[in-house]
Amino acid sequence: MLQASSLAEQPDLRASLRARDFPFHYLCGERDGKFRAIAGELSATAHVINHAGHNAHRENPDAVVACLAQFLAS
């Protein structure tokens, strides 16, 4: 499972995401340097989840829910 979900095993979709014509929100943990760097490459609205790393939804679920609720309500 971990090997199959590794970024090295997945197609690189960054070019497609940069070329999109729809709004794109990107959530990542403040301690996840790799995915924070990717967020900067995507021209997306980045939402950095405080006190979280790669598994922000597990490490700070309240902040993830608040973030999702905020941009879904707008």
Image (cartoon, grey):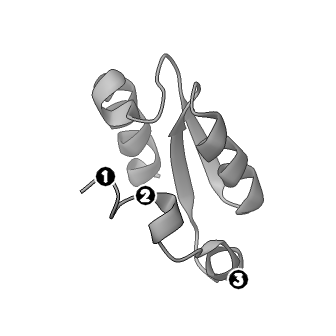
Residue that carries the numbered disc 2 in the rendered image: 6
Residue drawn at x 54%, y 52% as measured from the top left: 26
**Which mark is nearer the camera, 3 or 1?**
1
Query: Type of residue at label 3?
Result: Ala
* Residue 29 picture location, percent across and down: 52, 32
Whether tag 2 and tag 1 are in contact, CB under 8 A, the answer is yes
Specify few, some or many for label 3: CA neighbours under 10 Å numbering under 14, 14-19, or 20 or more: few
Disc 1 is placed on an element classified as loop
**Which mark is nearer the camera, 3 or 2?**
2
Residue that carries the numbered disc 3 in the rendered image: 19
Residue that carries the numbered disc 1 in the rendered image: 2
* Residue 60 picture location, percent across and down: 35, 22
Specify few, some or many for label 2: CA neighbours under 10 Å numbering under 14, 14-19, or 20 or more: few
* Residue 39 picture location, percent across and down: 66, 51
Disc 2 is placed on an element classified as loop
Q: Is residue 10 left or right of residue 57?
A: right
